Image: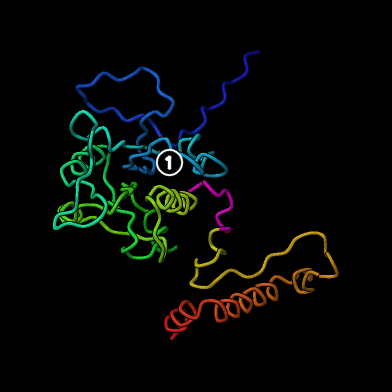
Amino acid sequence: MTQPKSPPSKSHGRKAVRPTLQPQPLMTDTPDLHDVWRASVITLFPEMFPGVLGGSLTGRALKDGKWQLDTVNLRDFGEGRHRNVDDTPAGGGAGMVLRADIMGRALEHAMRKGPGPLIYLSPRGRRFDQAMAKSLATTPGAIFICGRFEGLDQRVIEHYGITEVSLGDFVMTGGELAAQAMIDATVRLLPGVLGNEASAEEESFSNGLLEHPQYTKPAEWQGLKIPDVLLSGHHGEIAKWRQAQSEAITRARRPDLWQAWEQRRK
């Protein structure tokens, strides 16, 4: 007796077909997918990617086609024998500035892949937070511009309406690590990546507060015990304890978050 064939597994992304004047290989390691969240990264160091994004949950989701990662090598759009991408600052000063025309060509190339916000990783930008990660997770994807040297020609930022985003009040040698952090925070919020969707709902910042303490086996370690309420099996009391802990930790460690949370409750 012939066994019925099992239905094919659902694909999270399918190859997109676009006309092009350049020949494409029949097989690639990272096929161009359609209908999945896409992160396009403009960088002088594409070899830095996927980096940490290739491991753990984000790496598995990338392999499973739940999101797409593209790198655009800015050097490919440079000029001259050495593919120069920068020049000295107008008005004088130390360092070099990424040229507007070079970055413009790279952006036009990246935007042909699909829509999405344009983000320039910059120490003078608005600070990245969980709310921004949630917002990005609802978009088709984003284009991340990794700065280098003294920065990017302001005309590019204004012409394309680019949003400047910072990880915090510090300066890094480039935007690659910051881009990976932002992508990681966003990808883990995409459907099916975490597996347990409740995990994201209970994490720090998800409701405006820092997360409550976590415990697991053994019940006692180095003379320290798990709080009795967590072993009681009384879910209502556990929820109240966790809420109280989140409020106390937020009030002590992040007065800014506590003030904002209190304002929203009024």
Circle 1 SS class: strand
Colouring of the image: rainbow
Which quarter of the figure has residue 14? Answer: top left
Please tell me which residue is depicted at 31% across the width and 46% down the height of the picture.
143
Instruction: Determine the residue located farthest toward the bottom in the rendered image.
Output: 266
Against 107, is 248 above or below?
A: below
Q: Position of residue 51 (x, y in %)?
A: 48, 41
Please tell me which residue is depicted at 63% across the width and 70% down the height of the picture.
212
Residue that carries the numbered disc 1 in the rendered image: 67
- The answer to if 188 sits in the magenta stretch is no
Q: Position of residue 24 (x, y in %)?
A: 30, 20
Q: Would residue 137 appear left or right of 82 to someone viewing this image? A: right
- The answer to if 198 sits in the magenta stretch is yes
What type of secondary structure mainly makes up the magenta span? loop
Please tell me which residue is depicted at 52% across the width and 73% down the height of the picture.
209
Figure quadrant of the N terminus:
top right
**Kind of residue at disc 1:** Trp
Against 113, is 172 above or below?
A: below
The magenta region covers 191-199
Instruction: Determine the residue located farthest toward the top in the rendered image.
Output: 1
Most foreground residue, 68 or 92: 92
